[in-house]
Image (cartoon, helix red, strand yellow):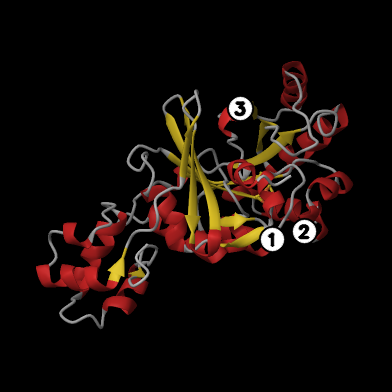
């Protein structure tokens, strides 16, 4: 990024008005045009905003920028999964993953560099916390990738806990679903969270996007071992919220439980029974995720039969259950793996 220029990528319409109203000869309709050039047409060069007066384009170009640094590293797996490594200000490393499956191309966005929550199975958790991403830094992960005009879905499931950086994430969502902005359907966006009560309620009430709750164990003690955040937000608190708000969800707005399958740890019959009970209570489907082993962890991936058996147990209890295909293992596609590999964190 040009350090002498101010980044206005990520500014919503009101922010642009506040920022640009003092720029001489800038009318309100010019600001509307600029907003649409940025978010609807994905143009990041003021000189290409052809319906703006030439003088205004020059003034904008002298003072502002809409770009950040391109990805530092791009890795492509044989199955088409692609991983981008970005470096933002203050050495904030961030990973963005693009996953192709049938007709769907999903971009997995990061909301923070590293993470505060230190889940034991997560490479990002090993990094520690390096900072929140700004609205512009989150959006740049979409604008700087080859798939900018090809993706079908977005998941906030990369590095970090999105509801721990809620202000920026909600603003990005607003820009993405605004018909005068990116114009995406709510159904194409999913926010994945460990469950931060106030912000979870806000997300359910104020947006219409899908929510994926990272559960990983239906038992308090065990979840506490796997996810230290459990200290702060006990399981029952999140279950109570999702139970109360279950009617906000429908076949068009999905509530999913994300469940990482860890060999010999969380795939017993008792786990299936307790998980099915929670899923049925809150009307959630379950997405089972085979653990993606990386370089510095003690967990193992269950074998195929173990995974299918666990899925069958849930199905027998009436839970809609899918097993996520493992993607991009050779490029370390789970969040945080590329960074921790680069930095040799063990
Ligand atoms: S699983 Fe999510 S909340 Fe837990 S450490 Fe990783 S990024 Fe953070």
According to the image, label 3 marks what residue? 326
Q: Secondary structure at mark 3?
A: loop
Q: CA distance from mark 3 to mark 1?
A: 30 Å
Q: CA distance from mark 3 to mark 2?
A: 29 Å
According to the image, label 1 marks what residue? 197
Q: Residue farthest to the top? A: 305
Of labels 3 and 2, earlier in sequence is 2
Percent position of residue 17, x then y:
30, 75
Query: For this rendering, which residue is in front, 11 or 120?
Result: 120
- Residue depicted at x 74% and y 39%: 296
- Residue depicted at x 18% and y 82%: 24
* Residues marked 3 and 1 touching at CB (< 8 Å): no
* Residues marked 1 and 2 touching at CB (< 8 Å): yes
Would you say 138 lies left or right of 8 here? right
Query: For this rendering, which residue is in front, 177 or 264?
Result: 264
Q: Which mark is residue 233?
A: 2
Query: For this rendering, which residue is in front, 250 or 310?
Result: 310
Of labels 3 and 1, earlier in sequence is 1
- Residue depicted at x 78% and y 32%: 262
Query: For this rendering, which residue is in front, 272 or 22?
Result: 22
Q: Secondary structure at mark 1?
A: helix
Would you say 140 lies left or right of 112 here? left
Callout 2: few (<14), some (14-19), or many (20+) C-alpha neighbours within 10 Å? some
Percent position of residue 28, x then y:
21, 74
Of labels 1 and 2, earlier in sequence is 1
Q: Secondary structure at mark 2?
A: loop
Q: CA distance from mark 1 to mark 2?
A: 7 Å
Query: Which of the image's four quarters has the C terminus?
Result: top right
Percent position of residue 178, x then y:
36, 56
Whether residue 110 is visible to the viewer of this picture, yes or no, is no
Callout 1: few (<14), some (14-19), or many (20+) C-alpha neighbours within 10 Å? some
Query: Which of the image's four quarters has the N terminus?
Result: bottom left
């Amino acid at each position: 990024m040009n350090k002498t220029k101010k980044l206005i990528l990520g500014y919503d319409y009101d922010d642009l008005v506040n920022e640009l109203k003092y720029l001489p000869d800038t009318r309100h309709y010019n600001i509307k045009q600029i907003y649409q050039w940025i978010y609807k047409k994905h143009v990041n060069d003021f000189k290409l905003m052809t319906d703006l007066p030439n003088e205004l384009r020059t003034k904008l170009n002298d003072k502002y920028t809409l770009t950040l640094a391109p990805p530092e590293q791009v890795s492509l797996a044989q199955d088409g999964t692609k991983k981008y490594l970005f470096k933002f200000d203050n050495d904030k490393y961030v990973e963005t993953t693009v996953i192709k499956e049938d007709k769907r191309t999903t971009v997995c966005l990061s909301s923070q560099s590293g993470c505060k929550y230190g889940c034991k199975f997560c490479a990002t958790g090993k990094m520690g916390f390096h900072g929140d991403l700004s609205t512009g830094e989150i959006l740049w992960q979409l604008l700087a990738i080859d798939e900018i005009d090809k993706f079908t879905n977005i998941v906030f499931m990369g590095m970090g806990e999105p509801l721990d950086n809620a202000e920026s994430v909600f603003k990005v969502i607003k820009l993405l679903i605004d018909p005068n902005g990116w114009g995406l359907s709510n159904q194409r966006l999913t926010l994945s969270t460990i469950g931060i009560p106030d912000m979870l309620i806000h997300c359910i009430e104020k947006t219409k996007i899908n929510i994926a709750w990272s559960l990983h164990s239906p038992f308090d003690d065990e979840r506490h071992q796997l996810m230290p955040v459990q200290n702060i937000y006990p399981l029952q608190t999140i279950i109570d919220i999702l139970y109360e708000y279950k009617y906000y969800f429908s076949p068009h707005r999905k509530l999913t439980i994300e469940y990482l399958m860890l060999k010999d740890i969380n795939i017993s019959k008792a786990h299936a029974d307790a998980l099915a009970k929670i899923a049925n209570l809150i009307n959630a489907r379950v997405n089972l995720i085979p653990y993606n082993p990386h370089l510095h962890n003690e967990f193992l991936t269950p074998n195929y039969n173990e995974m299918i058996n666990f899925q069958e147990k849930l199905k027998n209890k009436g839970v809609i259950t899918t097993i996520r295909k493992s993607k991009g293992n050779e490029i370390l596609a789970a969040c945080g793996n590329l960074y921790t590999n680069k930095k040799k964190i063990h």
